[in-house]
Image: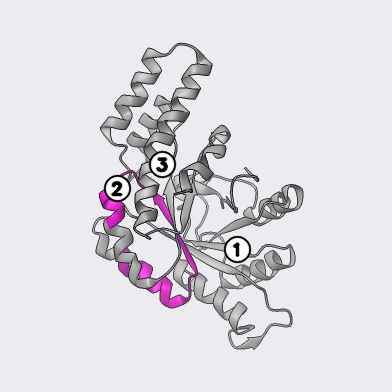
């Protein structure tokens, strides 16, 4: 990924499934690859005291970007008996980061070596009603968020409407895209991911590639081309309207797609 992206998100036990600690993983990635990371930090597992210590620890390890998230409930994951914490929410976590960074304090007590971080947050263009999501984002803006990353969206008109509403906040926005490396991935994403629907014409095209092309190499190339031909005009239109600052690409197990990213984002 390193030659093709500005920074990489490092997730914090998504879907409540146990994974390596996201702070440790972020540090290892930066140290071994030189690629800047966006450390996803959830409020699910640790109270305010613990999170404050983690923020100072992350700074000491060279991390400089935090994505403030609520986190998926443990009931969804592989340790459903785990007790969730949720001492903070994503907006109050943003406030905590800003207090520590901007004021060098926590609970009005001086921090000897204040951390330095940029802090971002998530936004969901698929929310219904949209107004409730806009209000949530407004709360995050008031808390001091510096950038937004959206969830995956395939509907251009919905994206334009949502991003236009966010324009009032004057915050850089990275639009979430999910290039799909196969028909089964596309179908599963449409069926099982809440709040996201893959347009029928995309599913039909991906299904045609699966059924009409037998050669594995040619099939991969066809999927790559189909993703590029969908996302290039989609992103170009949003860039032309000055609605996004970049893209948040979730190419899961699809590393061969990364060389296409600069072509997609370039006008």
In front here: 228 or 145? 228
Which residue is found at the position 54% from the left and 67% from the top? 119
* Location of residue 224 in the rendering, given as x and y in whole percent from the top left corner: 47, 29
* Location of residue 31 in the rendering, given as x and y in whole percent from the top left corner: 75, 52
Q: Residues within 10 Å of mark 1 (few under 14, many from 20)?
A: many
Label 1, label 2: how many angstroms apart (C-alpha)? 29 Å
**What element does badge 3 sit on?**
helix
The image's colour scheme reads: one colour
Which residue is found at the position 31% from the left and 46% from the top? 195
- Residue at label 3? 232
What numbered label is drawn on residue 156?
Answer: 2
Residue 63: in magenta span:
no
Quick check: 197 left or right of 22? Answer: left
Pick whichever of labels 1 and 3 is earlier in the sequence.
1
Q: Are marks 2 and 3 in contact (CB under 8 Å)?
A: no
In front here: 228 or 119? 228
- Residue at label 1? 65
Which of labels 1 and 2 is toward the front? 2
Which residue is found at the position 65% from the left and 45% from the top? 3
Q: Are marks 1 and 3 in contact (CB under 8 Å)?
A: no
**The N terminus sits in image quarter:** top right
Q: Is residue 36 visible?
A: yes
Q: What segment carries the magenta color?
A: 133-160
Label 1, label 3: how many angstroms apart (C-alpha)? 28 Å
């Amino acid at each position: 990924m390193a030659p093709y992206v500005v920074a990489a998100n490092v997730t914090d036990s998504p879907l409540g499934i146990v994974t390596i600690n996201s702070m440790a993983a972020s540090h290892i990635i930066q140290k071994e690859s030189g690629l800047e990371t966006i450390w996803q930090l959830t409020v699910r597992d640790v109270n305010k005291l613990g999170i404050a210590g983690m923020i100072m620890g992350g700074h000491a390890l060279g991390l400089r970007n935090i994505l403030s998230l609520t986190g998926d409930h443990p009931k969804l994951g592989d340790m459903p008996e785990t007790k969730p914490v949720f001492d903070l929410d994503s907006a109050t976590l943003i406030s905590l980061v800003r207090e520590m960074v901007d004021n060098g304090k926590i609970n009005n007590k001086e921090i000897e070596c204040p951390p330095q971080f940029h802090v971002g947050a998530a936004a969901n263009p698929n929310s219904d009603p949209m107004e409730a999501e806009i209000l949530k984002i407004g709360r995050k803006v008031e808390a001091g968020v510096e950038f937004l990353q959206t969830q995956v969206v395939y509907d251009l008109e919905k994206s334009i409407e949502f991003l236009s509403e966010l324009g009032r906040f004057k915050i850089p926005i990275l639009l979430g895209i999910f290039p799909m490396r196969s028909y089964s991935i596309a179908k599963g994403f449409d069926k099982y991911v809440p709040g996201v629907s893959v347009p029928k014409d995309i599913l039909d095209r991906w299904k045609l590639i699966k059924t009409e092309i037998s050669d594995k190499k040619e099939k991969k190339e066809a999927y790559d081309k189909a993703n590029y031909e969908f996302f290039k005009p989609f992103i170009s239109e949003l860039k032309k309207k000055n609605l996004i600052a970049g893209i948040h690409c979730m190419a899961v197990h699809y590393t061969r797609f990364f060389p296409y990213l600069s072509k997609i984002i370039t006008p």
